[in-house]
């Protein structure tokens, strides 16, 4: 087992009970760690990567304090901040959160966080901040060109494509909303949808039709073409089988999100879509277990995740203070 710095700590991380364990090192997890460390809580982060979706964003222009910054740079700055506060990140993936040492409604609690590498970490409180991954097309060129013209966030990347030609892939509320947004800021948009009808709300469909945005129905993207950046897409009509190539500067994909919450579904805290409902204090149905960021099914923006991370850390601190007062610690 290694910390982010790459040096072995042996069983030091496992042979103790942390005040707070944060699962996920995106903006919500980083912010929760910043606040928790400043509150004096012994805090550890477990994450399979750094930054999450934020790190994949080529340019960010809507995060307060930065006119223009790359997602990787913002990730690096947040990471540096938690390191300066003494919070380590363990690179691992959580397989299960166990409640066998947690009274369901009363405290104090001791969560067991079990990773895929077979490690077990104990903590009195837990914040789940693993995010929700955009559903992908899984076509050639998509992964290689992500951040180089392939995007899953029009609000983040749309302004970079003013005056340029892009396609939006999808037919639900998000796809239509983002296509309308892109057109409103001067992007040349065409929408590509695999079905012959949209799945979006009627009022949104009406607005979309009134916008005059060109639409290609019954069509799927089979390949995204480009070397250093997106140059074209290959399309296939699902009815006729006809294939064609379309020159574009960008591909915006909005075919849904997949919350990365399989490891907590057994706790009964997720909804039918895999998201984790929370109250205004970021509390879940399990006392001592909090959630923050995209997995709470909110407006998927860095600024929102940051705010939720701060609230979750404060709620964990208040609960620990309550438990300490009862046990005399």
Image (cartoon, grey):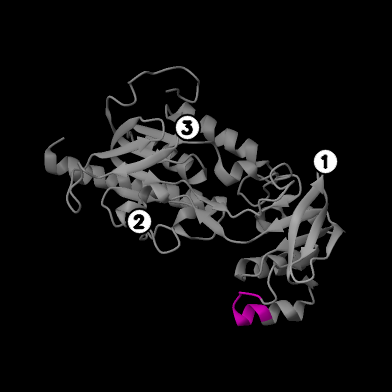
| Residue on which the image places disc 1 | 227
Total marks shown come to 3
Residue 48: % across, % down: 49, 36
In 3D space, how far apart are the residues under numbered discs 1 and 3 (Cα atoms)? 36 Å
Query: Residue at image x 70%, y 44%?
Result: 58
The quadrant of the rendering that contains the C terminus is top left
For label 1, the SS is loop
Query: Residue at image x 72%, y 41%?
Result: 144
Q: Are marks 3 and 2 in contact (CB under 8 Å)?
A: no
| Residue on which the image places disc 3 | 82
Residue 203, magenta (yes or no) = yes
Query: Residue at image x 18%, y 40%?
Result: 324
Upstream in the sequence, badge 2 or badge 1? 1
Q: Which residues are magenta?
A: 198-205
Task: Tell whether 189 sits left or right of 309.
Answer: right
For label 3, the SS is helix
Q: Quadrant of residue 229?
A: top right
Residue 6: % across, % down: 50, 20
Q: Quadrant of residue 165?
A: bottom right
| Residue on which the image places disc 2 | 281
């Amino acid at each position: 087992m290694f910390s982010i710095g790459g040096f072995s700590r042996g069983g030091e991380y496992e042979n103790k009970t942390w005040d707070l364990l944060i699962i996920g090192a995106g903006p919500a997890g980083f912010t929760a760690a910043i606040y928790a460390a400043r509150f004096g809580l012994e805090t550890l982060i477990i994450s399979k990567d750094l930054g999450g979706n934020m790190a994949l964003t080529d340019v960010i222009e809507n995060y307060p304090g930065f006119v223009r910054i790359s997602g990787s740079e913002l990730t690096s700055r947040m990471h540096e901040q938690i390191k300066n506060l003494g919070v380590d990140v363990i690179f691992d993936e959580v397989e299960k959160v166990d409640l066998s040492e947690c009274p369901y409604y009363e405290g104090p609690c001791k969560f067991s966080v079990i990773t895929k590498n077979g490690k077990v970490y104990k903590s009195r409180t837990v914040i789940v901040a693993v995010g929700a991954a955009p559903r992908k097309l899984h076509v050639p060129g998509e992964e290689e060109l992500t951040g180089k013209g392939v995007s899953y966030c029009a609000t983040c990347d749309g302004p970079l494509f003013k005056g340029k030609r892009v396609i939006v892939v999808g037919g639900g509320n998000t796809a239509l909303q983002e296509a309308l947004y892109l057109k409103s800021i001067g992007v040349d948009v065409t929408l590509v949808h695999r079905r012959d009808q949209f799945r979006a709300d009627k009022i949104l469909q009406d607005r979309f039709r009134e916008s005059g945005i060109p639409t290609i129905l019954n069509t799927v993207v089979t390949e995204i073409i480009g070397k250093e950046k997106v140059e074209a897409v290959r399309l296939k009509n699902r009815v006729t089988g006809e294939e064609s190539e379309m020159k574009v500067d960008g591909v915006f994909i909005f075919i849904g999100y997949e919350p990365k919450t399989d490891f907590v579904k057994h706790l009964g805290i997720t909804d039918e879509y895999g998201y984790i409902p929370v109250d205004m204090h970021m509390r879940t149905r399990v006392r001592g277990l909090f959630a923050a960021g995209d997995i709470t099914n909110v407006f998927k923006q860095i600024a929102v995740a940051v705010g939720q991370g701060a609230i979750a850390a404060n709620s964990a601190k208040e609960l620990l203070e309550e438990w300490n007062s009862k046990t005399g610690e």
